[in-house]
Image: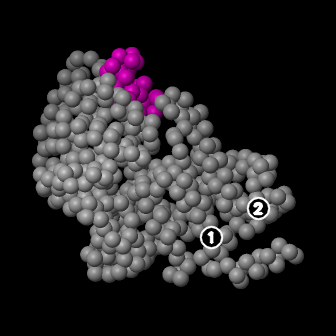
Amino acid sequence: MTEETRNTELEKKIDAYIKGNLSNDEVKSLWVDLLRQPEYISLLKTEIDVTRLHQARQGSATQTDYWKWIGAAAAVVLLVISLNVFTDDAPQSIGAYTQGEIGLIENLSSSPVTRSATAVEPSDSLLNAGFKAALDGNTQAAINIYSSILQEYESNGIRSKAYLNLGILHYNSGDFALSIESFRNAIAKAGDDEILKERSYWYLGNALVNTNKFEKAREAVYQAYSRGEIYKPEAFRLLRRLDYELGNIDFDNFEQQINELE
Amino acid sequence: MMVKLIKFLYLYECPLKYRLNSMDFPNLVEAIQEDDTTELNKQFKELSPRLIAFLQVHMDAEKKDAEDCAQEALLKSLEAIKEQNIDNADRILSFLLTTCRNTYLNLIKKKNPHRFEDIPKGFGHKPRQLLNILDKERRRILEWCMQQLSKSYKTFMEYWFAYPDSDARAVANHFDISVNNAWTRKHRIMKKLSQCCQEKSEY
């Protein structure tokens, strides 16, 4: 493939595919194109690997930021393990199956990925401004920006994104009641945006677990599980754990059973 | 003779863009319809690694499962394509992808019959391989290759991947280049990395 025979449209589609911004049909059509142009399959693989490497580095960076807590956490873990050894073989706490802090870079919704677009809507600029404020650690500023979107704009598309982002920020701050309200609003306004719904249901389920509302949590997690594939493995484990918590299943050895089912 | 004439006219009359999209499997339909085993073997040999890549990337299949399923899907599809008289390369390729996906899902179902839902809805919208972490060897090679990039390329790539949802214009503005130039730069970087990784391993 030379510069002259480049297929820039295909490159943009690959970019959108990696970010989960293509519909089922568009993905299929992309793969038909890729079957014809295998050199782009190699580029896709590389781009996926770079994305995965970047995600891994983000994770490590976050861990490094919190290294001071590791010592204290390790002590707590040791204490919990020793208590477990002397008590019973109960499964891991349900909290271990939920999402910890929600990664902002991958999960905050910003303006659509239309890198070839020629103009940015003011509402999209606000979404991007909120994204940048959140990444810079200015959570309150980001919350204010997203709240201003809700005050100024009527469109369901932009409002659902603002609600989702508010939910994420509240979740990370431990304000689960506010996050639950935001995720529910995001779902109500999501319309045909199935990806946004799937994400909102998953986070809603996690927030509900954190407030011990297990039945409602199960309903939300099941919605996330059945709607798509983004959270399939995590949702599967959490559903089984919730079933155990709710008495729907009665395993003698929960951990062993869940490992066998996966 | 007529087929050759049509191909000749097609190559000269079609714009390059469309030719590129359709030239890869010009004989596939013909080979299937005429049961030309030699040509079919040739075509399937080319298609097989691409379908394996589809299963590995899109479905996150293990290499061995992907190889088995691609092989099985090609054989299954052949009869179905003939029976249904599919005479369009696009539809054949689309049919092959669906068959590959279904064959793989059936395999997974056999391996793990206790899943909540055996078949995810729709074709899927994102590469499932992204859910998996990069294995150590591939990570080592990729990091080495990234180190070989020029400083400006490294900076560009870091920025692009640090703000995945940002607009290409934002990237272009940041580096004071045109949007098209931003895409070109990204393409060149990916190409360099891809070549480097392939040279360093059987990537």
* Drawn side of residue A89 relative to residue A232, left or right: left
Image coords of residue B113 (percent x, y): 55, 29
Circle 1: residue type: Asn
Circle 2: residue type: Val
**Circle 1 marks a residue in which chain?**
B
Query: Image height check: is B99 above or below A207?
Result: below
Q: Which mark is residue B29?
A: 2
Image coords of residue A163 (percent x, y): 25, 46
Task: Name the residue furthest right.
Answer: B1
Q: In percent of the image, x 61 and y 56: which residue is there? A: B51
Name the residue beneath numbered marker 1: B21
Query: Image height check: is A258 above or below B70?
Result: above
Inspect this view and state whether residue B166 appears. Answer: yes
**Circle 2 marks a residue in which chain?**
B
* Drawn side of residue A128 relative to residue B41, left or right: left
Question: Please, which colouring scheme is shown?
Answer: one colour
Q: Do the residues labelled 2 and 1 touch (CB within 8 Å)?
A: no
